[in-house]
Amino acid sequence: MPAPVPASGSVSGPTPVSPLTRAEALARSTLLDVGGAAVDLDLTRGDAVFGSVTTLRFRCARPGAATFAEIVPGTLRRAVLNGRELDPGALRGGRLPLPDLAARNELRVEADLEYSRTGEGLHRCTDPADGEVYVYACCGPGDTPRVFAAFDQPDLKTPLAFTVTAPAHWTVLSNAAGRRTGTAPGGAARWEFAPTPPISPHLAALVAGPLHSVRAGHDGIPLGLHCRRSLAPHLDAEAAGILDVTRRSLDRHHELFRPRYAFGKYDQAFVPEFGHGAVENPGCVTFREEFLFTSPVPVTERDTRAVVIAHEMAHMWFGDLVTMRWWDDLWLSESFAEYIGHRVAAETGVFPGAWTSFAVTRKPWAYDTDQRPTTHPVAPGDVPDTAAAFSNFDGISYAKGASALRQLVAWIGDEAFLAGVNAYFDRHRFGNADLGDLLGALARASGRDVHGWAERWLRTTGIDVIGPAGTPAARPHLLQVGLYDRDGGTGRLVARERVRAEIAPGAPARVAAPGGAPRADLVLPNDGDHTYAKIRLDEDSWRAAAEGLSGIADPLPRAVLWNAARDMVRDAELTPAEFLELAARHLPAETEPAVAAAMLAFARTEVADRYLPPERRPAALASLAATCRAVLGRGGAALRPIAARTLVECTGAGGAGGLRALLTAGDGGGTRDAEPYRDALAHPGAALRWDALARLCVLGAAGEDDIAAERRRDRGASADAGAARCRAALPDPAAKERAWRGMLGGGDAEHAAPLSPHLVAATAAGFWHPETAALTAPYVGRYFEEVPAAAARGAAVAKVLGTALFPAHAVSPATERAAARRLDRGGLPPALWRALTERLDDLRRALRVRAADRDAAAAP
């Protein structure tokens, strides 16, 4: 047997690999037919490496040809192809050459692989509450070979069967049903799992550790909920609500789609340090454990969880049952799950306001992404490799794609849409498909030119603006126009009627009220938010909206109007001060939590911190604080926690007493200083307490002792991240330097190993603050010099460093020049290049808004 060959890399970050190109994937898919993958993992080899033995059985269409498999080992011990030993030294860039293939082949790969701390591969973490260890797989584009040997591309699906050796007190989960079958030498347990139906390698699931589980069932499908053991009381408390959403979502999916759920049992595991919201592994969905609420949270967070549960379930059909052939059709997975997830949440009643929430939280993500230089079509058709694919998990692939699907349903009708989708499932069940396959099914079902529609909607970039200017539309729009009149008695805007309107490609993108009737006070394009476009109003309509926005009964048109106001600020058509006045006038009367949360967040993070110059920030925070106090005084119970959190973020040094009262609530605290937070004091919740402590740290009114005390009090999912944010917020040079080194890969006071992307993001959230701008000013220059090297830890880390850690508060020409120079120098990892390009564009937008605001103030 050849001597084992160590591979480069360490447990601190992923070993560099060669991204798989689309051309290579196409060549390999025409050559191979994979018949099965058996993976045996040994999780008992310590805290750095695990054993991985993979057996792949596959056919070759051209005997004698060569290809490669992917594996990213710490040590490659042995590779055997058809009984022939392969040279481990031939492994390069994660690729193992496979020469002289037979018609039928068997490859066995034995390796020691390194645990991940970046969420790429098999992530390993320790629970600070009790010292227990947990591992879980996260196999994004190119990451499956960090767990086992594979032909790692979406269109080489195969049945997958895991066998796992794990500590005796652990539970192990995977995609398929499994059981503990015996004891391994040393007392470890052996677990065996049934083969899955054919799935793509990136959908492999493994979750292991001393899990706490709640088991149930529905409609013949075994259901399971799982979390780390220290969170057991919280899972028990939340299980009924989570299972209710799960059951109702399953029923609605079975009503919409002809094929039943195809993957046997349905586990949902809440895992620590997760860098995603959730991942749709068939049969075993993984969620970030922040969705397992450990204390009271605003209703918006429960609503978001309901949508995410429905979104991941939609993937069981869109993405898992039928999978894209290559990553350029990512939209076939994410856009559909985004659309169906919101639709199911709304139609089942688990979140009736799902489409309003989509309008003010998800669509702005798409609008912002689509206006940056890195935008791309929903279905780009030119994703060259897996590195580029990683960057396309963005607002385009999710929210713009879902918006386009909503427009498609409005155009061809729901009956035709579902008929086409079900025909698509029938034809490609357990297989792969592309854009053309779906469009063909929809065209046959509807009799419409769906291909022409797709060329306009899915192959183009940018946003049409529907408004008085009437610029030519790039794509067709089918929408509603709302006509509203002032009620003479109350002054409220009352809906008169909604009329259907169509805009053809190339025609002026404007709508008009029907003739023969008195002119409406407010003419609102896209009243039901059925299309994807910016909205601009004529002068009379804007005046009516600015005066009566909160008086419109239906929350969805209110959301459309708020989005228009937000866009106008970003496009320097509405001053930041005017937006704050709009918020002060209308948010206290807002009844939809998602609308209030989105607009308060925009006002706080964008308007106050970036779009206004520093000297005007205190007045902006005071205005926002007054708005929040008005919401606390007048708003409903669902609105108060949202207002309280924003009020915490607006609090200056003079309000430190009230923040302190939040920390002592329930411990005999509560004074006159706490009056603004009186509605939050009874049950402040861990998130609000950490917010309050972080703000106290920024203001220099709390320190390490306070952080340690709160950490002892909170043993929930938010504790690690909350403490990291607070430590980074301390206005102390030594604390800033420790936080900086931790984020860039040197670990921190609590973690000898480099921080996970989850903790890097939490630390970054505390690091930059306008209040401490002088203290952190030297780090702005250091950011552009030091972050590129740290980003080499992996794409997930690079993305967090390029987004969360970017000095967005430092809105100045100097920061703009520094960012541009670093991008011009090149040599950046793709994920960091994408993030920096986008942040630079956002910075330039903020500078334009400030310049326009100065000009407006100087005008006579």
Image (cartoon, grey):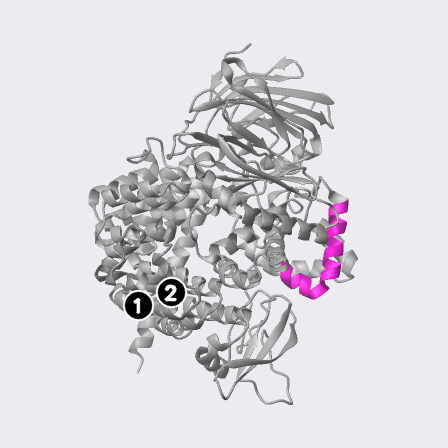
Quick one: which residue is furthest to the top in this view? 1
Q: Which residues are magenta?
A: 405-426
Residue 329, given in percent of the width and then of the height, sits at: 63, 47
At numbered mark 1, what does the secondary structure look like: helix, strand or loop? Answer: helix
Q: What secondary structure prevails in the magenta region?
A: helix
The amino acid sitting under disc 2 is Ala
The residue singled out by tag 2 in the image is 603
Q: Residue at x 63, y 57 (%)?
A: 348
Horizontal arrangement in the rendering, residue 712 relative to residue 241 (left or right): left
Residue 65, given in percent of the width and then of the height, sits at: 68, 25
Q: Quadrant of the C terminus?
A: bottom left
Question: Which is nearer the N-term, disc 2 or disc 1?
Answer: 2
Q: Is residue 648 above or below residue 236?
A: below
Q: Nearer the viewer, residue 797 or 696?
A: 696
Q: Residue at x 55, y 9 (%)?
A: 1
The residue singled out by tag 1 in the image is 620
Could you tell me if the residues under marks 2 and 1 are in contact, i.e. CB atoms within 8 Å?
Answer: yes
The amino acid sitting under disc 1 is Ala
Which quadrant holds residue 222? top right
